[in-house]
Image (cartoon, rainbow, N blue to C red):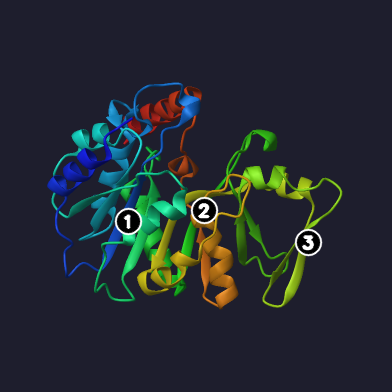
Amino acid sequence: MENGKEIFKIVEELSAGIDKDAKEFAVILAAGHGKRLKSEKSKMLHTILGVPTVERVYNACKEGIENVFIIVVVGIKAKDVLAHLGKREKTKYVYQQEQLGTGHAVQVALQDLKNVPDDAIIYVLPGDMGLIDAETLRQFRAEFLKSNADMIVLTGLYEGKPEENYYGRIIRAKDSGNVIQIMEHKDILALPDDKPYTVTYKGKEYTYTKEELINNNEYNSGVFAFRYGKLAEMIGKLKADNVQSEIYLTDLIALFNEKGYMVAAASPEKSYVVMGFNTQEVLREMNEIAKKVYSTE
């Protein structure tokens, strides 16, 4: 068990002060462990072509978002991640002592943000997305600005067997195609087989069978952007009423929709950039993709 006091001290020593002129912030979620990896090493320090995934995500943010201020959320194996990244310009660390979900991680990250303008942009990215690149983040930022939305999610299309797709599914309105919510895989599995799932969106009811939701191949990549004012207003309303008793960041979509705030979605040009990993097999696959991609650039 890591010493919390010691980690808070290291976090303080390595963190830069918040840039008072910053208008764009990237929150990198680097607190998870990845039990299915069966490894003693931090999930974030597993490598793609020798470079830790958290480093690759960090570099994509720095290169893809001009003048970005980065907040890295550390948790399990925090000391190892902190030792690797070290003190960096325009970079602050926060310690998520208890892993209570992605929504909780962002709550922790926002605690020290003061006097940030409502129209500032907050990006959120998983630290294991080792194939994300600066070009994808530039495109994502442009899509967000063009959409005039309050929140946007980067989605992927799963190409394997539906039963092996453990990602949260993007649920869209069947008529307009608007994003209604994201439903986590485990919560879909917990639904009754004989009763459709019903959701109300803009005063209209939409129904989906359990099979329909499982077979839906559009998934949540875990990459989001928000207008700061709306995010700060809504982040405290997240609740842990789900199968895993965790505070999901994805629940913000439904909350934003209920409030009448605009939610958009975008997909990357290159499908592989949104890959994350929970097993050594997928990590090997990501390394193979990286070999091909970077050898042709």
Q: Nearer the viewer, residue 250 or 131?
A: 250
Q: What amino acid does circle 2 point to?
A: Tyr
User: Around disc 3, counting alpha carbons within 10 Å, would you say few (fewer than 14), some (14 to 19), or many (20 or more)?
Assistant: some
For the C terminus, which image quadrant? top left
Query: Under tag 1, what secondary structure?
Result: helix
Q: Quadrant of the N terminus?
A: top left
Q: Earlier in the sequence, mark 1 or mark 3?
A: 1
Relative to 251, residue 232 above or below:
below
- 3D distance between C-alphas at marks 1 and 3: 35 Å
Q: Residues within 10 Å of mark 1 (few under 14, many from 20)?
A: many
Checking the image for residue 109, the label placed there is: 1
As drawn, is 22 to the left or to the right of 279? left
User: What amino acid is at disc 3?
Assistant: Thr
Measured in 3D between alpha carbons, the distance from the residue under mark 2 to the one under mark 1, in whole angstroms, is 14 Å
Residue 207 numbered tag: 3
Locate residue 20, reporting x and y percent: 16, 69
Residue in the picture at 33% in, 49% down: 28
Answer above or below: position of 46 versus 181.
above
Q: Locate residue 69 relative to residue 43 in the image: left or right.
A: left
| Residue lying at 16% horizontally and 50% vertically, measured from the top left | 15
In contact (CB < 8 Å): disc 3 and disc 2: no
